[in-house]
Image (tube, rainbow, N blue to C red):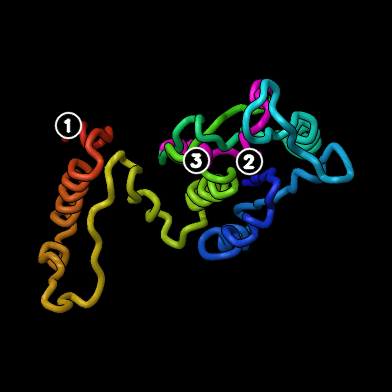
Amino acid sequence: MHIDILTVLPELLESPFQHSIMKRAKDKGLLKVQVHPLRKWAVNEYGQVDDYQFGGGAGMVMMCEPLAKAIEELSLSRKYDEIVYLTPDGEMFNQKMANTLSLNENMLLICGHYKGIDQRIREHFITREISIGDYVLSGGELAAAVLVDAIGRLLPGVLNDETSALFDSFQDDLLAPPVYTRPEDFRGWKVPEILMSGNHKKIEEWRYEQSLQRTKERRPGLPGELSPE
């Protein structure tokens, strides 16, 4: 998978993809992430990519010209399956969406900044608008990093244990069950006996019940919590 990220602050994205699972994905050649500074397509020698909004009001708006030129130039190199704009008023990102996006070959992520981007770019270039939550960040860079991480770990061959991602929270619309590791007894706090039994059928039943209970308590309303057994 190839992911291009267009941003006014490329420095914010220097670290997230240089460690852990994302680094492994890149080293294996399974994921390529390229960060492009929008000021490369600035409208003047001062690097201007934003201007005051028509109609007045506080805050600057990212201009049409730099964004359009950047998107069109990058689109010459590859055909994008999705051109995504990260914005608080977008579709809420979730695991199901991550699964779907992980099937793409090429994506372009547009990081908003200031008061956002000119509406005409959204209407004529953007194919999908995504939010990672009901709150406002200083820009779309952290949201882009979240998307890349959530999507990249799903690519076949990225995780050492291919089945690991299948049991993450939200994969079946349920939260993951509690997990334990050694020692079996820590300060008198013991691991549930069922997990030490070796009875894999009973263990899976226990884990499912724990997932149902945890989801009902913490995230009531998730589809998995409402589904009949």
Q: Which residues are magenta?
A: 96-123
User: How many marks are shown on the rendered structure?
Assistant: 3
Residue of label 3: 136
Residue of label 1: 228
Q: Residues within 10 Å of mark 3 (few under 14, many from 20)?
A: few
Kind of residue sitting beneath label 2: His
Question: How far apart are the alpha carbons under marks 2 and 1?
Answer: 44 Å
**Residue 33 location (% of width, % of height):** 65, 51
Q: Residues within 10 Å of mark 2 (few under 14, many from 20)?
A: many
Which of the numbered marks, if any, corresponds to residue 113? 2
Which of the numbered marks, if any, corresponds to residue 46? none
Question: How far apart are the alpha carbons under marks 3 and 2?
Answer: 11 Å
**Residue 77 location (% of width, % of height):** 78, 39
Mark 3, secondary structure of its residue: loop
Among the 4 quarters of the image, the one containing residue 191: bottom left
**Residue 65 location (% of width, % of height):** 80, 30
Q: Is residue 19 magenta?
A: no
Residue at horizontal 58%, vertical 62%? Answer: 23
Above-or-below relation of 185 to 67: below
Kind of residue sitting beneath label 3: Val
In depth, the one of 96 and 42 nearer the eye is 42
Quarter of the image that includes the C terminus: top left
Q: Nearer the viewer, mark 1 or mark 3?
A: 3
Any part of residue 48 in sight: yes
In depth, the one of 122 and 139 nearer the eye is 139
Tell me if label 3 and label 2 are in contact, CB under 8 Å.
no
Any part of residue 109 in sight: no
Mark 2, secondary structure of its residue: loop
